[in-house]
Amino acid sequence: MSNERTRAIVLEQVAALSGKADTVVSVWDTQIFPLTVGGLLIGLQEILMLRALVGARRGVLCVISPKDAGGGVAFRAGDAVPNPLVEFAMATQAIEEFHYLPDHAAVAGVVAGRSALLWPSETVARERAHVYGTTLYLQALYDRLGRLPMLSVAGPAKEWARRFLAEKFGARPVIALHLKNKPGAINESNANFPAWAEFLAEAPVRHECGFVLVGNEPVPDSVRSLPHVVLAADHGSALCRDLALIDCAQAFMGMASGLCQMAMFGSKPYIVFKNPGHHAPEMQLELGDADGFNFSGRAQKLLRILDSQDVLFREFGDVLDALECGTEEART
């Protein structure tokens, strides 16, 4: 599908939204596009923006996944949730219900009796005309709303993250890090660990700050052994806690990944590096020649460059400037 056609599909669907609804029911079809961490974050942010647009009090996410659904599996606020993706989704303010469903026909049972906005619409879903895993809908919705409702984490995960950061770093500002590491993958946005090790050894000496490293990738000793770097995975963190740490930290730096999108949908400064050869056509469609989205703030960047030591220090300077100004000003 061409870039022009993809953009036209997105704009047509957003332009068709109208009226008021009590509930937004969003459907993610894993038979078309898998539900990854990044995809889930995008889907939840879409729900937040749709709720703001139509005045909905509730959000519902329906995942079409025959292998997970069986006869239909529902999670509601307060339920015990064994799946880390569902646990995170239910810890956000985006949704109050999560449903695994066997097919699109089962969505009707979720919508029945509600004043609901169905996203994508039944017609769009039937024609398989929805584009998954893109920020284009968010950018189009932002053009209509003029603001970005911030995705955040609540509940036990956030309480744990706050305690953890206070215990490990005290009153120092904390930068959350995700250093992607998929050895052997071509053009992936893998971290340049020698550059990061040099940066992380010097930055806390020059500036009174700490770094919390999230994710479960292998981390070399050159980074692991640094005194101002704490690996969350060594202290019982997992997906929901990692995302809560990003939510609670004062800023984010790292590689393009699903986790980094938690920072992208917040108000705090972030610097994300993406290998310029990774998803190059898709990134050109979403960003053009810009280094941020239309909803990004001044100190919020997605850079399609390699993460050299000089670049890390240069961009860290912008993060520090934004922290001194305050996060609200960072978005202006």
Image: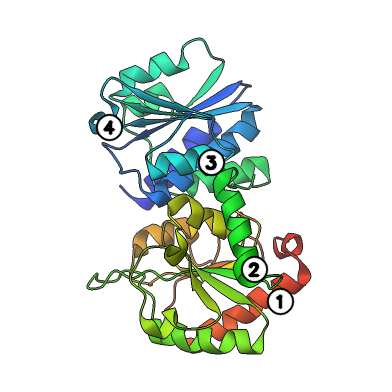
Q: From the top left corner, tell me how far across and down residue 11 is, in percent.
A: 50, 40
Q: Provide the secondary structure element on which disc 3 rests.
A: helix
Q: Is residue 250 or residue 297 the one in the foreground?
A: 250
Find out whether the residues at labels 2 and 4 contact each other: C-beta distance under 8 Å.
no
Residue indicated by mark 2? 299
Where is 272 relative to 195, above or below? above
Residue indicated by mark 1? 321
Q: Provide the secondary structure element on which disc 4 rests.
A: helix
Residue indicated by mark 4? 68
Q: Mark 4 belongs to which amino acid? A: Asp
Q: Mark 3 belongs to which amino acid? A: Ala
Where is 173 relative to 207, above or below? above
Considering only order in the chain, which callout, 2 or 1, is on the residue closer to the N terminus? 2
Residue indicated by mark 3? 91
Q: Mark 1 belongs to which amino acid? A: Asp
- Mark pair 2, 4: CA separation: 40 Å
Q: Residues within 10 Å of mark 4 (few under 14, many from 20)?
A: few
Q: Can residue 245 be seen in this view?
A: yes
- Mark pair 1, 4: CA separation: 46 Å
Q: Mark 2 belongs to which amino acid? A: Ala
- Mark pair 1, 2: CA separation: 9 Å
- Mark pair 1, 3: CA separation: 31 Å
Residue at 43% in and 66% down: 234
